[in-house]
């Protein structure tokens, strides 16, 4: 068995005296592990850091085997991401969240969104907004996507400021006003086509409350799990 693909390093853990087991999120082969022989060498260590984009070749005798990776650095982001607390915690949260994806199941949309997030994770103006978008993408991939395209009650496509916790759909200001105390706020940046918008801190907070509600209710609680501490650590670091 053999394939080539691009992948983002999620984790790398020592194996034996000189090898490393590397976990990648690849574009066409999903979350995939493999053994890198000599991965603890001085030349390989900088490449195998979480957040880096690599070119991967995977080989194994049988598809179900762990297999061996040969990895070549493409975009080495790790050093930049380690310069501040927020991207460090953000990278930990991303790695934790993506482990909810079934192993070896392709998720190209998540891969593309992840690349965009990592390229801007160190930017305090747009990094947190992109992280909220990544959480939304993960909810969709896990089967719990939110419908923010139109009002659940009226079908209107404008003045959408709420999300119904019951239906996970957007609700307009007029339709949601009688139930405002039971609604989740929908920050405008989540329905904007621009990824370069600079949302206000309160909008970022609303975005994380929104995604956090559905991640907890639909993803973690049914699995008998609590939300990982890495998410709270990232949000706290973003707030400064």
Image (cartoon, grey):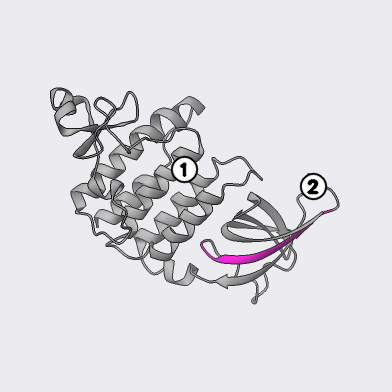
Residue 160 image offset from top left, x and y in percent: 22, 38
Q: For the N terminus, which image quadrant?
A: bottom right
Q: For the C terminus, which image quadrant?
A: bottom left
The residue that appears at 36% across and 54% down in the rendered structure is 130
Q: Is residue 46 visible?
A: no
| Numbered badge on residue 138 | 1
Near-viewer residue (170 or 110): 170
Magenta run includes residue 57: yes
| Numbered badge on residue 63 | 2
Q: Taken as a whole, is the magenta stretch helix, strand or loop?
A: strand
Instruction: Write down the quadrant of residue 18 in the picture.
Output: bottom right
Give the side of residue 209 with respect to residue 41, left or right. Answer: left
Residue with the most extreme bottom position: 43
Question: Relative to 173, does residue 94 appear above or below in the rendering?
Answer: below
What's drawn in magenta, residue-wise?
A: 51-60
* Local secondary structure at mark 2: loop
First in sequence, mark 1 or 2: give its number: 2
What distance separates the C-alpha of mark 1 from that of mark 2? 26 Å
Label 2, residues with CA under 10 Å away: few <14, some 14-19, many ≥20: few
The residue that appears at 30% across and 27% down in the rendered structure is 165
Residue 21 image offset from top left, x and y in percent: 68, 56
């Amino acid at each position: 068995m053999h394939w080539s693909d691009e992948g983002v390093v999620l984790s790398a853990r020592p194996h034996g005296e000189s090898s490393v087991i590397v976990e990648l999120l690849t574009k066409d082969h999903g979350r995939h592990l493999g053994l890198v022989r000599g991965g603890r060498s001085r030349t390989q260590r900088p490449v195998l850091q979480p957040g880096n984009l690599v070119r991967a070749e995977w080989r194994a005798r049988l598809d179900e085997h762990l297999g061996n990776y040969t990895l070549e650095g493409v975009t080495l982001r790790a050093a930049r991401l380690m310069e501040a607390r927020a991207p460090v915690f953000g990278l930990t949260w991303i790695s934790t969240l993506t482990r909810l994806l079934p192993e070896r199941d392709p998720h190209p949309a998540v891969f593309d969104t992840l690349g965009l997030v990592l390229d801007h994770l160190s930017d305090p103006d747009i990094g947190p907004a992109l992280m909220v978008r990544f959480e939304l993408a993960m909810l969709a991939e896990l089967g719990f996507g939110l419908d923010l395209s139109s009002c659940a009650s009226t079908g209107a496509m404008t003045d959408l400021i709420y999300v119904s916790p019951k239906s996970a759909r957007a609700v307009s200001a007029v339709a949601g006003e009688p139930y405002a105390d039971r609604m989740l706020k929908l920050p405008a940046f989540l329905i904007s086509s621009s990824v370069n918008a600079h949302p206000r801190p309160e909008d970022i907070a609303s975005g994380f409350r929104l995604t956090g509600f559905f991640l907890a209710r639909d993803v973690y609680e049914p699995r008998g799990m609590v939300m990982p501490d890495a998410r709270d650590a990232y949000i706290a670091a973003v707030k400064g």
